Image (cartoon, coloured by chain):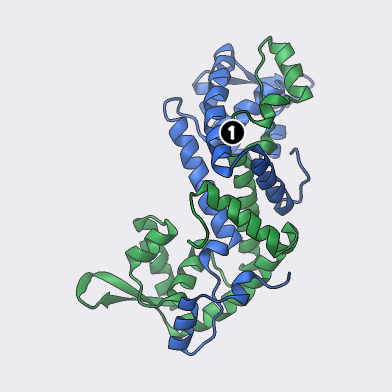
Chain colours: A blue, B green
Amino acid sequence: MRETKARNRPTARTKAAAAQSGVELELPPMGSIIGYKLRRAQLFVFQDFLTAFAKMKLRPAEFSVLAMIAEKPGQKQTEIAGKLGIKRANFVALMDGLERRGLAQRQKAAGDKRSHALQLTPEGSAFVEKMLAVWREHENGLIAKLGGAAERDRLIALLDRLLDQSGEA
Amino acid sequence: MRETKARNRPTARTKAAAAQSGVELELPPMGSIIGYKLRRAQLFVFQDFLTAFAKMKLRPAEFSVLAMIAEKPGQKQTEIAGKLGIKRANFVALMDGLERRGLAQRQKAAGDKRSHALQLTPEGSAFVEKMLAVWREHENGLIAKLGGAAERDRLIALLDRLLDQSGEA
């Protein structure tokens, strides 16, 4: 368990390069590197998302924010930004965009004038309904690629281990 | 298989929000969304990488380029950029940085004056040796979190399905 597969089985090309340079480098195949493969998969999924949402002009972070406001209206900016791991400055810019488009709005929170409670506008609620239909098709495409919902659950569980989480979140 | 778990089991909060707004929104829990979870896991792994490589001042893309040059010296810029999915302009900037640091160099490829073959310098070779030792520790930490090399292989295999790949790459 302490040694990776790459260490145990250097590729033919690795050996050739090592012979050439005189150094045994024990290079891992790129495709077995967790961070590299995660990044490629994440970029693929985001590209697929952007293609699905090209007409609605929606980015993944905006999707997440709208979904979280819809799930529990009245949550504070800081709460949603924290849960999603979005930096404050980026979150403010994102909310500005959603307000400009008339989809969401900030309201002064009762009892705390500095914090803002987030709400969907009526247009925002209608947008979220359409958004979820488009998203479900995108997500079902990914689930089909993985081989079904059980494989999706397996993938999520493995990613949760990296994140030290045990479901939900 | 066509329906996600989220559709079948709306959360309590989703139902509450739906009751409040009068619309059945069928919101997925964020933690079950493939793209969202992939992005969180990728950011975590990259952050862990950057922490591990803080002293060596190395970013993930630079790691990949150095590893690929070390694996097969003399490969062309376009070849490596293509395999790694790095855009031309970004790749040129990245190679400029590696050249400035004295780790790698471009050489005019024989027979094709417009393309450059990439090589490590002697300093670059020594750097790559240290880099691989640091990387292995970082990677072994991730593998331990996943629960062992078999779980790592399972994760890579699932990500390969999203990418329509069957190993290697």
Q: Residue at x 65, y 53 (%)?
A: B44
Place of residue B119 in the rendered image (x, y in percent of width and height, measured from the top left): 38, 78
Q: Is residue B58 above or below residue B125?
A: above
Secondary structure beneath dot 1 equals helix
Residue A104 shows in this picture: yes
Q: Residue at x 54, y 49 (%)?
A: B161
Place of residue B153 in the rendered image (x, y in percent of width and height, measured from the top left): 64, 60
Q: Quadrant of residue B20?
A: top right
Per the image, the residue denoted by label 1 is: A92
Q: Is residue B113 above or below residue A129?
A: below
Q: Nearer the viewer, residue A8 or B134?
A: A8
Q: Is residue B55 above or below residue A17?
A: above
Residue farthest along the bottom direction in this orientation = A22
Place of residue B24 in the rendered image (x, y in percent of width and height, measured from the top left): 67, 15
Q: Is residue A24 above or below residue A127?
A: below
Label 1 crowding class (10 Å Cα cut-off): few <14, some 14-19, many 20+? some
Q: Left or right: B35 with respect to A48?
A: right
Residue A81 shows in this picture: no
Q: Residue at x 60, y 26 (%)?
A: A66
Place of residue B16 in the rendered image (x, y in percent of width and height, measured from the top left): 76, 17
Q: Nearer the viewer, residue A39 or A106?
A: A39
Q: Left or right: B114 with respect to B87?
A: left
Pick the quarter of the image with the N terminus of chain B: top right
